[in-house]
Structure formats: C-alpha cells, structure tokens
Image: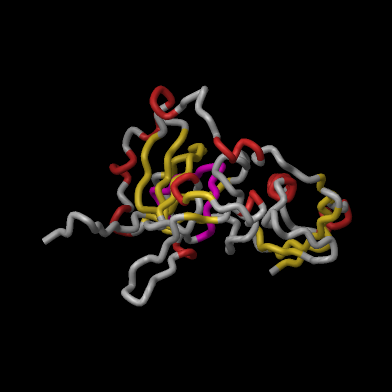
Amino acid sequence: MVNPNEYNFKVIAKIRSDFPDKFGIPRQSGLLKKMKSSIVFEPEFRVADALRGLEGFSHLWILWIFSENVRPDENGNNRWSPTVRPPRLGGNKRLGVFATRSSFRPNPVAMSCVKIEEVRLDGPDGPEIIVSGADLMDGTPIVDIKPYLPYADSVPDALGGFAEAVRKRQVQVEFPEALQRATALSAEKLETLTEILAQDPRPAYQNDPERVYGFKFAGFDVKFKVQDEVLTVIDLIQL
C-alpha cells in the first residue's frame, strides 16, 4: 500500500558534465549559456519514442536530486533545517529554507532550466539530449524532464527577492596567456572556464588573498587566488 506522505522516484537519467565535484559549478542554471552537458538515460528509459515531439521545444526543465547533500538521520530520513545561510550572502544571514534554493531541504530536489542543443536518437548512448546552461555535477541523478513553455513559465515582471542584490556580482579575471596556450582545453571550454571564474566560485565568506583555491573542470585542476576583486589563475593541472 502506498503511503500518501511518502513517494519513491526512479532515476530516469544522469547528467554528463565537465564538473566532477560540487565546487566551481554555476550557482544557477542558464548563467553559462555556452557550457554543454548531456542527459544520458538509464537503460529502462532509453527509448526514442519517449522523446517524440521534443524537437519542437527550445528549452527543458530538469528535475534532479542533490545527491551529494543528502544527510540521513538515525532513522534514515533526510535531515533539514527551517533556516539556512545562503553562501552568496556571506554565510552569516539566516533565511527560510523555502525562500532559498539551498540544497539542504526536506526533500533534496532541484530544478534547472536548460537549452536543448541537440537530440541524438542514435549512438551508443542514444537517445541522448545535449543541453547548454546546466548547473549539475557529473553523474547527478535526474528524476524527470519537462518542456519549458514560454507562455506559462516566463514571468517578465517577477521579483527576485534577496537574490537580485548579488546576482550581478563578478570579479576581474587574469588568465595568463601562457597558461591558456599550454592547456589542451578547446577555445570554447577556455571561454566557459573564464566565465565560471568571473562569477567567483568561492563562498562569499571566504576572502583570504593568500589562499589558493581550486576546482576540477573538464579534466583539469584549476588553481587560483583572489585579491581586491581580481581573480588570478595560477595553474592548470591536467588530471
């Protein structure tokens, strides 16, 4: 018998992206419009007919699981708090969990709007959906996808709350040309990496100019420092 207060979901697909870890991932979908990922379906759902008609849409909603932030209690239930500290506000101000997109929620469910770049029905992983603008770590489980409907999903005069105050904050990026030339990253991925760095991947409460930060992207370990709103790439190490 189904408990009306509990529901189980099947993982229908997983994302394939250039981010093997959480650190460095864009904080929202759509911020890096050129960054491509792919939605690869699980064997049970690898059916071309399930995507029939998708070619008429330009964008998708992805419903996915914060799989790296599940914190079970002694009974196996996901722990949560009614208030959280959004990193973009410095990690000191508490807000209600339902007023944020924090990953520490009663149910670790997230949603992202992405652009459909290509629907590949054939190939070893087909059907496969190539998308841009995703903010998911490589291997993140996806529980559903739905087409984006401009007439219903777009609200031009909507208010963005506290997020509006910090969404445009960026830093200046100094990326030595010698490092760029020495890497095997394509021009497209170098451009994407520069955009990621400009958004300052650090939590807002970390501001040590001597600290070397790092995150993994597209097979490289990216090392950088930040001082006086200038982010300097100091090394790119191939993994």
> What residue is drawn where x is 30% and y is 49%?
47
Describe residue 107's horizontal placement relative to residue 86 as left or right: left
Q: Which residue appears farthest toward the left when viewing the image?
A: 1
> What residue is drawn where x is 85% and y is 65%?
210
Where does the N terminus fall, quadrant-wise? bottom left
Q: Quadrant of residue 147?
A: top left
Q: Main secondary structure of the magenta part?
A: loop
Describe residue 68's horizontal placement relative to residue 48 as left or right: right
**What colouring does the structure picture have?**
secondary structure
Residues rendered magenta in the picture:
125-138
**Residue in the foreground of this view, choosing between 38 and 82:** 82
Residue 164 point in image, percent of width and height? 61, 36
Where does the C terminus fall, quadrant-wise? bottom right
Q: Is residue 227 magenta?
A: no
> What residue is drawn where x is 48% and y is 61%?
139
> What residue is drawn where x is 46% and y is 51%?
97
**Residue in the foreground of this view, choosing between 36 and 134:** 134
Residue 205 point in image, percent of width and height? 70, 57
